[in-house]
Image (spheres, coloured by chain):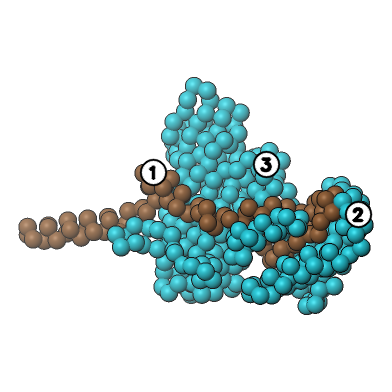
Chain colours: A cyan, B brown
Amino acid sequence: MFFFSQPSIIDYINKHYVPVVGDDWYQRRRTDAEGIFFTGLHKQAPHTTPDGWSRQGLYTLTPDGRLLSFTNTWKMKPFMEYLHGGVASWNKLPPEQREPQHFHIEALPQNALDPDYVRTPPEGGSILKVYTRILEHDENGALQICREQGEKAWGTHAAMDHYWMTRTEVRSLFTEETAPFALPEKLAVRLMKHNFVDNTRGEPTRWELDEMVNHRFTSNVLFADNAGNTTYALSGSVLLQTSDNPRGYKADFYGTYTHNIDWQLTDFKMTVVGDHWGDGKYTPHSRPGSAPLGIAFHLVDGTKAEDRLPPQGIRKPERYW
Amino acid sequence: MRNWVIALTTLLAACNALCEPRVTPENYLRLHQLIQPTPDENHWKKISWLTRLWDARIKAAAEGKPILLWEMDGNPMGCT
C-alpha cells in the first residue's frame, strides 16, 4: 500500500495497466473459469507454491493469461523492476496483440461461478463499512491517531472490513415498543467475533464464544418524525479475552441508526473505543501492555464495488451467519 | 468522620472518572471521524482498482492493456 500511495506510481499504473485486487484465499480454491485462469497464471510465476498454499503476490499479465512480471516482496527496487518490467514485456509482444479488441473475453454468467467461493451481499440486506485503527493519547490525554512515517507507518493506518446483515436481521434492529431492548444476540456475537478485533497488522484471530466474557448491547428509540423515520441509539460495552489472558479487548461504544417508513436502514454510525492487548496468530508486534484501539462502523449503499467485498469472516459462511 | 466522608467522596469521583464510558453521545462522531482513513492513507485508492480478475481481463482486452493484479490473503480493499 505504501508504494501505491506515491503519485508517480499511481499515474504510471493508471496509464499503463488495468489494475485489479484479489483475495487469494478464494482465488486459489475456486474451480470455475476464473479459478482455473488464476491457477494457470500462478504456475508461470518464479515462486510457485503447492496446491492449497498461498499464492499472494503482485502479477502483471496479458488478457489471455501470460505472465509478464511477478514479485512477492515489498522492497522498492524489485517492486519498480516488476512494475516497469511488466510494461517492457508487454511492449515486446507483437504489435497486433497490443491492439484494443485483439483479445476477446466473454463475461462469466453468474451461474458459471463457483458457489462455494463467491460471496455476494444478501438481497435486501445492509452493508456496514468497518474501519479499525490503533490510537494513542496526546499530551493532554485526548485520543489521537498514531503518527509514524515511512515503513513504520504500517499498522498505524486504518484497517478495513465489512459487516453484512440480511433483510430479516436488519428488521430485527427496529421495534414498535418504547422501552430499551437488547440487540439480537446473533448480531452482537457477529460484531464481537469478526469486527471487535485488531486487524491493523494482518488477518485477525476471531473471538470464540467462551472468550466473550461479558457484553451489553442496548438499543433505545431516540426520536421519530412524522415521515416515519425513527432513530435509535445503540450503546454498550464488551470484555473479550482469551482464557489465559494474553489477548483481550475491553471497550465501550455508542452509535445511532435510523430506519425509514418502509423499515429500511437509512443510516448507521457507531464508534467503539477500548484497550486492546496481545498478539493474534497473524498479527504480531502489538504495542506493549494494553493500548487504545478504535473501531468505526457506518452504513454504505453498496454501489461501489469495493463496498460489496465480502467480510473477512465470511470465508466459512456457516460460521458467519 | 468528616475526613472519612471526604476521602470516600474523592475515591468515588475518581472511580467514576475512570469508569465513565470513553464513547458518549457527545464525542462518538468526533471519534468516528478520527478513526476514518486520512486523505494521505487513501492515496492508493486513486489507482482505478477493479475487484474481479475476470472483469479486468474484459477491460484490458477492450483497451489493449496489460493487467496488474495485487493478490493478497484478505482482499487488499476489504481487509487490512
Secondary element type, mark 3:
loop
**Foreground disc of the pair 2, 3:** 2
Residue topped by disc 3: A303
Q: Residue at x 50, y 44 (%)?
A: A269
Tell me the quarter of the image containing the N terminus of chain B.
bottom left
Q: Relative to A65, does residue A128 appear above or below in the rendering?
A: above
Quarter of the picture containing the C terminus of chain B is bottom right
Q: Chain of mark 3?
A: A
Q: Amino acid at mark 2?
A: Phe
Q: Is there a contact, CB below 8 Å, between mark 2 and mark 1?
A: no
**Is disc 1 placed on a helix, strand or loop?**
loop
Residue B57: image x %, image y %? 83, 55
Front one among A16 and A273: A16
Of the pair B5 and B34, the residue shown nearer to us: B34
Pinpoint residue B11: horizontal percent, then vertical percent. 20, 60
Can residue A189 be seen here? The reply is: no
Q: Amino acid at mark 1?
A: Pro
The picture places residue A248, in percent across and down from the top left corner, at: 47, 67
